[in-house]
Image: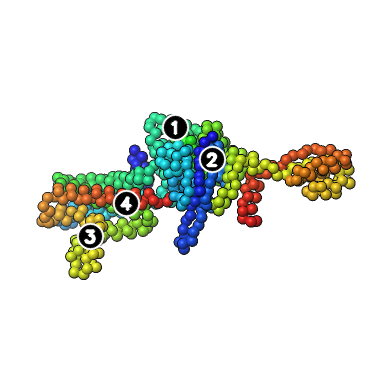
Amino acid sequence: MIALAIAQQTVREALRRRVMWIFLICGLFLISLGPVFGFLSPRDSQTVLRSLGLAAILLAGLFITIVTCIYLIPVEIERRTIYTVLSKPVQRYQFVLGKFLGGFATVFVNIALMGIVFLFMIWIQEHKVPTEMFQGVIMTFFQMMLLAALTIFFSTFATPVVNFFLSFGIFLVGNLSTVTESLTTNRNGVVRIVGNVVHYLLPNFGNFNIQNSIIHPTTEIANQNVYVAQNVIYAVVYSAVLLILAILIFDRREV
Amino acid sequence: MAAAISIQGLTKKYVGLQRDEVVAVNNLNLDVQEGEIFGFLGRNGAGKTTTIKMLLGLVFPTAGDATLLGKPMGDSSVKQELAYLPEETYFYDSMSGWDILDFYGRLFKIPEPERSRRVKICLEKVRLQPEAWKRNIRGYSKGMRQRVGIAQALINDPKLLFLDEPTSGLDPIAHSELREIVASLKDEGKTVFLSSHQLADVELICSRVAIIHRGKLLTTGTIKDLTAGGRIEIVAEGTQLVNGTLAKLQAIIPDTHEEANHIVRLITEDNNRISAAIDAIRAASGNIISIVPIKKSLEDVFVETVRKEEGL
């Protein structure tokens, strides 16, 4: 109940951030441009709408997640609102959990909104909503959940600026899983060790990008549902580990 | 009477960037009794806020220990009975005064409709105008924010309150009203640990005080004891006093001054000289108008104590 109260208050504060609304509006605008670009390229109109829509949700979701989550804990410390909260019978784990849930709910609402508009555009153009498109939105959502957990983890000890570069950098590296995977078999021992660390320790954001297989159906994934489920479990478990680490660090932090 | 706060050897050291050590609180030992308003005094940076933050578990002590309401410092169950008003009260800007109290009420797991009832009682107690209750806090004056700050500290009907500068920066009316509210907490049987620079307020409402300087406890005691003693002032009247006896009186009490209308004022800290001075006044046919002990103000005590420690 305490974590939920903190989460609700966090959503309320997060929704006041104008920059988040700007990214949401940009995302919705790009999605709505899908049919226009489709008309310019009639042969690939379906591909254009799908790829542009998913890319818009991913990009807007990425920035919304980062700008929402990097400030959640530092702002509480900087503005000293944390004093009155932690002097109440609030455990530090409840505070971190509440902040994560609040950030997560904010990201969920944004991605859901963009997802609904995106699926509606597809329905208008194709008169149906393919399951893969729905799965694409779900995967983006869980990718952002993992990013939110990563950002909350960094915010327990890093400043917002450092957090931005760390989270954004790891997101980029994590998206290059094919590259990092190739490093694990490199002949050079040092490169191989670094490759292993990067590939297996950092969150693998690349696996959530199933746009390629959706947009290009020739790319084969043995079982799409199993693949989605595996990645959802991966996101949940990895996020839980990050949150536990965040709680352990925050528990020892003086405010 | 049991101790609401018992501090034993509480110490907080910070290590700077160049590995230099700053002792914010140095081996502090202090007891605060239940039901008293205890003034915790010190200059800026004396270690007052650090002490409060350690007691509330916001920062961790380097050494020492403390109990609050008989439970170890850091025990989460004791927080049900505590309240804290930080020096600078910041709130979530998206909320109204009512929403803020409701939020803090939820952190205490107070169910509805009890929570709404308590929010209303607390806002009434701090005399926030009802038309402002549901208004966004961004439009509140400093006095209104401070009232909400005290109200949030009362939402759980606490036994022990830590108030850090509750009346600083307020206009005289708000200042006086909030001081009355803090004073009224004692009548409700609550213990108040009041950190303040407003020494006149502390003198009015606190029963005991402690003075801390550079993290070290300099003195502690009741206001009465700390401000007692000092000097005695004798005021006498008589034509012969100013004409012939003044020099004789000055020999007995050096701090003797002639004033208008044949009035002589004598001030001494030495009680043994008083009888001799009175005899001399009577011998010169003078009338004694008053003999009054001059109490030191708490400010005098504070300044003297701190200057003595600084070797000034």
x, y percent for residue B301: 64, 47
Q: Nearer the viewer, mark 1 or mark 4?
A: 4
What distance separates the C-alpha of mark 2 from that of mark 3? 57 Å
What amino acid type should be assigned to the residue bearing mark 4?
Leu
* Label 2 element class: strand
Q: Nearer the viewer, mark 2 or mark 4?
A: 2
What amino acid type should be assigned to the residue bearing mark 2?
Val
Q: Can you identify the residue that label 4 sits on?
A: A245
In this rendering, is residue A19 above or below B139? below
In this rendering, is residue B290 above or below A71? above
Closer to the camera, A48 or B189?
A: B189
x, y percent for residue B156: 44, 35
Q: Which mark is residue A199?
A: 3
x, y percent for residue A84: 44, 43
Which chain contains the residue that carries disc 1? B
- Residue B208 lies left or right of residue A212; in this view the side is right
Q: N-terminal of the two: label 2 or label 1?
A: 2
* Label 3 element class: helix
Q: Can you identify the residue that label 1 sits on?
A: B118
What amino acid type should be assigned to the residue bearing mark 1?
Arg
Which chain contains the residue that carries disc 4? A
Q: Are marks 2 and 3 on the same chain?
A: no
Closer to the camera, A234 or A227?
A: A234
x, y percent for residue A182: 18, 64
Q: Residue furthest bottom?
A: A188
What distance separates the C-alpha of mark 1 from that of mark 4? 37 Å
- Residue B253 lies left or right of residue B120; in this view the side is right
